[in-house]
Amino acid sequence: MDLTSVSEMAKSPRTKRKVLLEGLMEEVIAETLLNFRARQVAVATSIDKGAQLAGHAAPLKLMFKAMLLAVLSTCEKLDTIKIVGVVRKKHLSVAFDTGMKSKESEFKTWPLGELRSIAANGEGIGLAAIDAMARMHRGQLSVCHHQDKRDEYMLTFTH
């Protein structure tokens, strides 16, 4: 996904529907299975039953697919990407993690538009597109930097 596709989606009319996160992630994982096999990386999910997002399924699916592929690009052989979806009060959080969680780490909102802080490999532009798509669905992307130099990404949506 790039910023151009986000711009095109912003122009198209969207009807809001409830979309089950579990089913959406199953579709995304099935569509990216060959990518996982090629990198020899596994994926594991833990999603609250009944967790829902309000929006149109196609853009949401594109956003989660782009997020999963962005995380996959940072993985090493035999890593496991953990996807955790949790509903708390009026928020749905979806975390993507490949490293060990640290109690000292905290999530920081993704600096949308601050391209000067982006790594030379262009990964930041994809994350900016994901954040822009999340914002169109009343959400945002945040990043937690861990001591082992790996990042955990979280998409948080307001119901």
Image: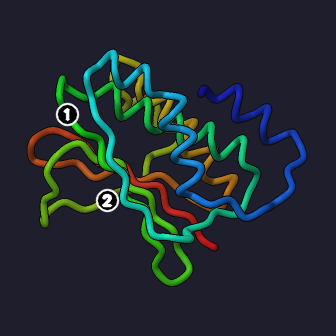
Q: Locate the C terminus by quadrant.
A: bottom right
Give the Cα distance between marks 1 and 2: 22 Å
Residue drawn at 53 percent across, 56 percent down: 22
Furthest residue toward left = 148
Residue drawn at 79 percent across, 32 percent down: 8
| SS class, disc 2 | strand
The tag earlier along the polypeptide, 1 or 2, is 1
Q: In this picture, is 142 found above or below 126?
A: below
Rendered location of residue 129, percent (x, y): 58, 36
| SS class, disc 1 | loop
- Direction from residue 80 to residue 63 in the image, left or right: right
Residue drawn at 37 percent across, 52 percent down: 45
Label tally: 2
Mark 2 burial class by Cα count in 10 Å: few <14, some 14-19, many 20+: some
1 or 2: mark nearer the eye: 1
Amino acid type indicated by mark 1:
Asp
The disc placed on residue 136 is none
Rendered location of residue 104, percent (x, y): 13, 64
Q: In this picture, is 64 found above or below 100?
A: above
Mark 1 burial class by Cα count in 10 Å: few <14, some 14-19, many 20+: some
Q: Nearer the viewer, residue 78 or 143?
A: 78
Q: Nearer the viewer, residue 120 or 102?
A: 102
Residue at label 1? Answer: 79
Rendered location of residue 83, percent (x, y): 37, 51
Residue at label 2? Answer: 107
Tell whether label 2 touches label 1 (CB within 8 Å).
no
Residue drawn at 25 percent across, 62 percent down: 106
